[in-house]
Amino acid sequence: MPSVKVKPVQKTQTAVLKQYVGGQWYEASGPEIASINPANTDDVIAKFRSATREDALKAIEAAQKAFEAWRGTPAPVRGRIVLKALQIAESRKEALARLMTREEGKILPEALGEVAKGNNLLEWFAGEGMRFMGTSAPSELPKNLLYTVRQPLGVVSIITPWNFPWAIPCWKIAPALVAGNTVVFKPASSTPAMAVEVVKVFEEAGLPAGVLNLVLGSGSSVGDVLVQDPRIRAVSFTGSNGIGKRVYSKAGLRGIKFTCEMGGKNPCVVMEDADLELALEGVFKGAFGSTGQRCTATSRLIIHEKVADAFVNSLIDKLKTLKIGDGLEPSVGLGPLVDEHQYRSVLEYLEIGKKEGAVLRFGGGKAEGPGLKKGYFVEPTIFDHVKPFMRIFKEEIFGPVLAVTRIKTFEEALALANDCEFGLTCAIYTQDISRAMQFADRIETGMVHVNSPTIGGEAQVPFGGVKGSGVGEREMAKEGVLFFSEPKTVFLDYTGQARKSNIY
Ligand code: NAP
């Protein structure tokens, strides 16, 4: 009998994660939190003792201590440390992506894409160290040099969600550091292992102790202090609308800077003249990519009635070919939801959709089958004939669920697309340039895609939303650094002649 080679089962150890404060790694004393593989809940990736309020205060103190020296470090030198962090991250991108798939659940090609995106952002912000400049202006006064410089704010809090555990910390931490701030970083409790990897690349790149501090702890125990402590000078938050509102209300009351990037309920409009093959690909990717767990996911399809039936049928045919499972398996196209909380929440929305009277065309429940028993898998789902008053039309579900609504005219499509408390991103598929331009002009979102899916962003352009999706300065691009700095205007009278002027 030929010998059969049995692949050894790889035992993975559960890592013990630590807080990073003042350049030291240490274990906190709060309750233990486990990071669990959402595709297989037997796989415990890591554990950590949650930070307490005292740990958060320690981190703020370390950041405060490090601030003077860091603000005095020339901006190009600060940028070069970010460049070094990028080189380290590039050298381990495969390992980072694999860990991301295990911890967050997105399929490996998407995880690789996210690492690449985060690294693009590190590249962009490293260069901002060289461009951290003010302006000069002609003064009304004689012999006066009138100029501005940009200065850091001080200690800033960075609070991030789990769905982009590499890219979002990169796009917040890098500009904060380049602008000369010191940082207390609080990642989501569901993706702590990825957060530790983020901090490690900066530590290895030579960031001085105390400049970046990691507080691993639940939002309910450390969230408030990271917004309310008087030493915190700004808060950069990404997450849900509910928590975001709480954060910006408190930050606003303190009169500090804040930027809150929050949820979305992004519409994709498909008109009757669209390239339907292109639109099909875009809606498929936008709605079901990353298991629908993107702030930019397509969650409402607003489609012309003339093409709706055929389009939805083709979408269903495509979904039938989608393999659900562990994102590390190359054939899998749809991974799990991130954790039990998210799993229960999406299943609840599926029931809400059924009860509200939407027509369930595909999916609608737990995904079952070989290899799916121990993970948080749900079926990709399409609800058709969704009405604007329904909750599944209005509320962010954050799962692979698409609500389809039919329209007769462009004006109706635009009105429905805008009939929403959120305003992050959107898409329109049409071959009529005039319609596309009118849509781009009148849609109430921070980003618009014409003939491409609702998802995506690039380092060199602002990212963010309006209405319930975003409050405060945009992220990425120049705006990313502007948020983390203040201009200072300097009047320099170099002869004393200005005293004769009566302009004051
Ligand atoms: P979330 O529940 O709002 O949590 C976001 C972060 O806030 C986490 O680190 C969380 O910590 C922390 N937090 C919880 N309570 C807090 C409090 N009282 N004070 C301060 N911080 C607190 O959001 P999520 O579930 O992680 O992420 C999904 C959401 O993020 C979706 O709504 C999605 O649309 C949005 N998102 C938006 C963008 C964008 O750019 N617009 C990008 C990505 C995601 P714990 O994990 O410990 O609770």
Image: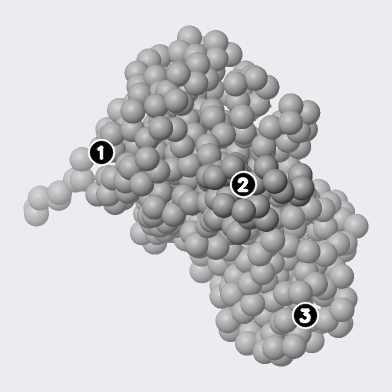
Of the image marks 1 and 3, the number of the one nearer the N terminus: 1
Residue 301 percent across, percent down from the top left: 73, 69
> Viewer-proximal residue, 43 or 203?
203
**Element assignment for label 1:** loop
Residue at disc 1, CB closer than 8 Å to ligand 1: no
At label 1, the amino acid type is: Val
Colour scheme of the rendered structure = one colour
CA–CA distance in space, label 3 to label 2: 55 Å
Question: On screen, 105 above or below 256?
Answer: below
Residue at (74% x, 31% y) in the render: 255
Residue 38 percent across, percent down from the top left: 49, 40
> Viewer-proximal residue, 332 or 300?
300
Of circles 3 and 2, the one toward us is: 2
Q: Is residue 261 visible?
A: no
What residue does disc 3 label?
438
What residue does disc 1 label?
9
Residue 46 percent across, percent down from the top left: 40, 27
Of the image marks 1 and 2, the number of the one nearer the N terminus: 1
Counting every numbered tag in the picture gives: 3
At label 3, the amino acid type is: Gln
For residue 230, which numbered disc appears in the image? none
> Viewer-proximal residue, 219 or 59?
59
Residue at (60% x, 25% y) in the render: 232
At label 2, the amino acid type is: Gln
